[in-house]
């Protein structure tokens, strides 16, 4: 039996974890206590974001899918920005994670690929919605005929 996925709550929660990771990396905390947990949480965030994207990507009939994709895009962007700052050593805690730079670079590439795919999906969905709302010349003529006959 498959469980219902609460995309809005899941995306909110992972976004909060990513924000907490940024705050933690922004201060000079003791790596002896926090390094393993921060690495674990970064890998966890990557895995959850990939899983949520995979499920949203295969379920195009989901109500609110477009909003979930937008929110997921923002969460992915936040993770990418965090990892870019870690690799660029712009955060005080970054120096403690140098040995993970290669893995973080892979995560960045993968998340950016997903972000481009999400962007393409949202643009395609928007174009399809706009096309549905366009009144054809034939429909317009029929509407004008009906209006003229009513007068």
Image: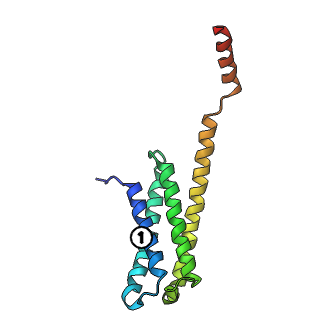
Residue 93: percent from left, percent from top: 49, 86
State which quadrant residue 45 falls in: bottom left
Q: Is residue 75 above or below residue 149?
A: below
Q: Is residue 85 above or below residue 18?
A: below
Q: Crowding near pointer 1: few (<14 within 10 Å), some, many (20+)?
A: some
Query: Image check: 9 left or right of 58?
Result: left
Q: How is the protein colored in the picture?
A: rainbow
Query: Where 95 falls versus 23 (above or below)?
Result: below
Q: How many badges with numbers are in the image? A: 1
Where is residue 144 drawn, in percent x and y? 68, 17
Kindly tell me whether residue 12 is visible in this rendering. Answer: yes
What is the residue that sits farthest to the left in this orientation?
A: 1
In the rendering, at what x and y percent does residue 21 appear?
Answer: 44, 76
Locate residue 146 relative to residue 65 in the image: left or right: right
The percent coordinates of residue 142 (x first, y second) are 66, 18
From the image, tell me which residue sits under label 1: 17
- Give the residue drawn at x 55%, y 71%: 80
Q: Residue at x 65, y 19 (%)?
A: 143
| Label 1: which secondary element | helix
Relative depth, front residue between 37 and 99: 37
**Does the image show residue 48?**
no
- Identify the residue at horizontal 41%, vertical 55% (top origin): 8
- Which image quarter is the C terminus in? top right
Q: Nearer the viewer, residue 81 or 108?
A: 81
């Amino acid at each position: 039996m498959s469980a219902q996925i609460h995309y809005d709550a899941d995306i909110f929660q992972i976004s909060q974890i990513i924000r907490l990771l940024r705050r933690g990396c922004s201060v000079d905390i003791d790596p002896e206590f926090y390094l393993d947990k921060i690495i674990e949480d970064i890998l966890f965030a990557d895995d959850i974001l990939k899983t949520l994207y995979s499920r949203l990507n295969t379920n195009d009939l989901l109500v609110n899918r477009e909003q979930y994709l937008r929110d997921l895009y923002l969460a992915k962007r936040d993770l990418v920005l965090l990892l870019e700052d870690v690799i660029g050593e712009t955060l005080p805690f970054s120096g403690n994670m140098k040995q993970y730079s290669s893995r973080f670079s892979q995560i960045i590439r993968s998340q950016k690929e997903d972000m481009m795919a999400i962007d393409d999906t949202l643009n395609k969905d928007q174009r399809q919605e706009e096309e549905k709302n366009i009144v054809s010349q034939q429909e317009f003529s029929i509407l004008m005929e009906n209006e003229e006959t009513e007068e």
